[in-house]
Image: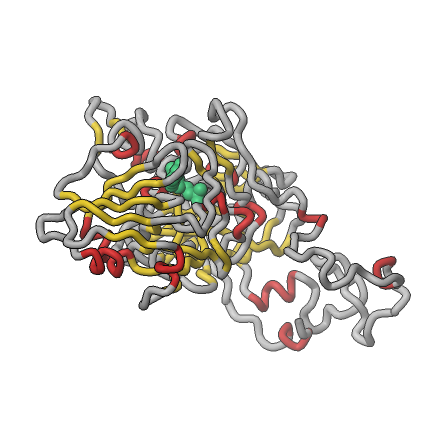
Amino acid sequence: MSTQNGSGSRGPEHASPGRAGSILSRRRFLAAAGMGAGAAAAGAGSAFGGAVAAAGPDPNIVPVPEWTKMLGAGVNANPYGKPSVFEKDVVRREVDWLTASHESSVSFTPLYALDGVITPNGLCFVRHHGGEAEIDPDKYRLMIHGMVDRPLVFTLEDIKRMPGRVNRAYFLECAANSGMEWRGAQLNGCQFTHGMIHNVFYTGVPLKTLLDMAGVNPKGKWVLAEGADAAVMTRSIPLEKAMQDCLVAFAMNGEALRPEQGYPVRLVVPGWEGNMWVKWLRRLKVGDQPWQQREETSKYTDLLADGRSRRFTFVMDAKSVVTSPSPQAPLKLKGPNVMSGIAWSGRGTIRRVDVSLDGGRNWTTARIEGPAMPMAMTRFYLDFDWSGQELMVQSRAMDDSGYVQPTKAELRAVRGTNSIYHNNGIQTWLVRGNGETENVEVG
Ligand SMILES: Nc1nc2c(c(=O)[nH]1)N[C@H]1C(S)=C(S)[C@@H](COP(=O)(O)O)O[C@H]1N2
Ligand SMILES: [Mo]
């Protein structure tokens, strides 16, 4: 960062978000950080703990560290690379009381520690109903049958040599994400309140390609997808969606699917609830009506206040969360800070994210940074100045269909509190004067 950027006139370039804090422009940041012209003397009140003299640092201020005085490990010390040992706490976590067994359970993505838009493969949350199937790729088979002209069986090699392979980034969100929060703030960390989501680049073949090879009967309206795991996870997918953008994927982020994500083949159902993304995909059957499987009737269905249920709520509505600060990522320093968060929508592309520092009274539009792709996780930032006052941090996503993420109160007014699934209400984090951050709700 050059000190020259601090010179020049100071325009009224910062917008006030209200009482709770102030938004930083780059120029104001340099001034606040003591990096502007005229603030170059050592220790001149820098928010970054000591600027150095304009003549350059005294080499003795920073002694040669121990790691410079010896040879490091060889290039192949880890044939499959691992994160730094100092990042050992950045892991998936379970919530002990949530489920009765580890085989039918969920581990959560450590969103608070991640940045950018792609979830690293080893940190993608895992949701199993019958444990992880271990499938020999040579013995893997995918069958297409039902209302088709030619029932077909594919090997993995068949799928990999099909024409028309694509790469697409999509979020996968379990419909139960934030489900524990329907009746009030409960879990202290965005890993647990929002961590049933991941966003990776899939490589695969459009499901349409396979269905066209089999020749769908004109009466065919639904596709049944079945997994090869002990749970035999089975879901009905409208043929229209199957033909539109579903993928039969064999790779994530450039490498083979991880076993816990469905190796060697999983179904990708962009923008729709995670449960439909059948892992260890074994069978696709074409029919003229839905099969009314357990996971699309008694489960993944929203029970309303009057006892009726919403039927087939497949699309995941727009949602967002501030990942830092958050309970597992408290604010550490006063002065310049970067608020970071994610937004996504199953209806399309995230167009705008607004952030509030005072519990929803005043809003400022955040900076969307990096690719904003349809039905994919989108990153937003707000550069802000924290003087140590209490904050009530919120974010509100808007997508290109015009949909605006609702408050939890708005959501409950329509859906009641019987439901577990499809909670996309606005999250509030209370940041205390010491930086500690808590999951709360505003009335
Ligand atoms: N075969 C099979 N597919 C499955 C499941 C399962 O238990 N078995 N769980 C579903 C659920 S509920 C979700 S939310 C997603 C989770 O995908 P992930 O484990 O890659 O995060 O997979 C879905 N596909
Ligand atoms: Mo799920």
Q: Quadrant of the N terminus?
A: bottom right
Residue most toward the left? 219
Answer left or right for 214 relative to 69.
Answer: left
> How many numbered marks are there?
0
**Splitting the image into four quadrants, where does ligand 1 fall?**
top left
Q: Position of residue 176 (x, y in %)?
A: 38, 35
x then y, percent, for residue 161: 37, 65
Q: Nearer the viewer, residue 106 or 362?
A: 106
- Which sits in the foreground, 154 or 50? 154
Taking 322 as reference, is 306 left or right?
A: left
Nearer to us in this view, 434 or 284 = 284
The residue lying at 36 percent from left, 49 percent from top is: 141
Percent across and percent down for residue 332 are 66, 46
In terms of image quadrants, where is residue 32? bottom right
Residue at image coords 46%, 60%: 367
Quadrant into which the C terminus falls: top left
Q: Residue at x 28, y 57 (%)?
A: 245
Q: Nearer the viewer, residue 375 or 359?
A: 375
Query: Which residue appears at 20% of the width and 56% of the height?
Result: 214
Q: In which quarter of the image is residue 412?
A: top left
The correct choice, above or below, for 412 with respect to 66 in the image is above
Does the image show residue 117? no
Asked whether residue 49 appears in the rendered view, the answer is yes
429 displayed left or right of 387: left
Looking at the picture, how far across and down is residue 442, in whole percent?
Answer: 42, 34
Can you say whether 257 is above or below 28 in the image?
A: above
